[in-house]
């Protein structure tokens, strides 16, 4: 059976996927620019250049739209991390470099949009329920990256807690930095925290980690 293609030469499935992508990208843009309260489905559809009916077809509610956008970007973030795996394994300081990559992965619109949803979910039960489903996916993928980077230590009972601690530290520093907008201060705080986190991971890994360069 022949595959039906439109005027652009793409199949219906390809056109549908492209429309979903535009809607997800527009959602992140709106969350960053207008916050959760200002991110309306109409505004997202306008930003994406699609009709309101097309938006409803793909994402029936605002909650569906915003949580799908975060899930999508979390998956892309994991792909970026995994692409760096071989480089980090060959590094003279895999722990320090991995922490730096984790920091860099929290920069940009995905983290800002996620924070908007965290705050909004405090008073929105439906959104809070959806975020309890999305958050483990987003953080769990980063934990899997850590296990892939240091498989010989992944079974350690404190390994998971150390990774979560690193993410909590990074998120706390970034949120606090929004009050001052001082890039130099932000960099200094991260360098200090990175040094302490590195000590934590080296201690966790015992003699195998103590010989790594500072």
Image (cartoon, rainbow, N blue to C red):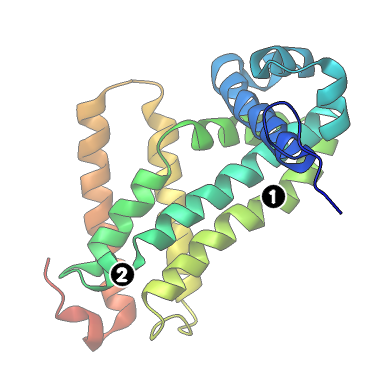
Quadrant of residue 96 in the image? bottom left
Residue at label 1? 134
User: Nearer the viewer's eye, disc 2 or disc 1?
Assistant: 2
Taking the image as drawn, is residue 124 in sight? no
Q: Earlier in the sequence, mark 2 or mark 1?
A: 2
Residue at left 80%, top 27%? 62
Residue at the front extreme, as displayed: 2
Q: Which mark is residue 125?
A: none
Q: Quadrant of the C terminus?
A: bottom left
Could you say which is closer to the camera, residue 153 or residue 176?
Answer: 153
Q: Is residue 177 above or below residue 194?
A: above
Residue 13 position within the rendered picture, expressed as x and y whole percent measured from the top left: 77, 42
109 relative to 113 in the view: left or right: left
In the rendered structure, the answer to whether residue 21 lies left or right of residue 128 reads left
Residue occupied by mark 2: 86
Visible in this render: residue 192? yes
Q: Residue at horizontal 70%, vertical 12%?
A: 46
Q: Position of residue 91 (x, y in %)?
A: 19, 68
Say which of 159 and 95 sits in front. Answer: 95
At horizontal 35% and vertical 47% (from top left) the residue drawn is 103
Say which quadrant the N terminus sits in: bottom right
């Amino acid at each position: 059976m022949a595959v039906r293609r439109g005027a652009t030469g793409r199949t219906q499935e390809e056109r549908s996927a492209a429309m979903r992508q535009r809607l997800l990208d527009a959602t992140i843009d709106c969350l960053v620019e207008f916050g959760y309260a200002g991110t309306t489905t109409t505004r997202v559809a306008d930003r994406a250049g699609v009709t309101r009916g097309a938006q409803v077809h793909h994402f029936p509610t605002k909650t569906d739209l915003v949580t799908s956008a975060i899930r999508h970007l979390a998956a892309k973030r994991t792909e970026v991390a995994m692409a760096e795996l071989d480089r980090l394994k060959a590094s003279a300081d895999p722990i320090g470099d991995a922490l730096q990559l984790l920091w860099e992965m929290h920069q940009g619109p995905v983290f800002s949009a996620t924070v908007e949803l965290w705050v909004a979910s405090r008073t929105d039960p439906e959104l809070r329920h959806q975020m309890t489903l999305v958050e483990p996916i987003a953080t769990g993928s980063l934990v899997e990256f850590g296990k892939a980077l240091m498989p010989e230590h992944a079974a350690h009972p404190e390994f998971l807690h150390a990774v979560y601690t690193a993410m909590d530290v990074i998120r706390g520093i970034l949120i606090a930095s929004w009050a001052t907008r001082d890039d130099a201060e932000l960099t200094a705080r991260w360098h200090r925290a990175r040094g302490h986190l590195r000590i934590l991971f080296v201690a966790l890994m015992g003699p195998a980690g103590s010989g790594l360069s500072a």
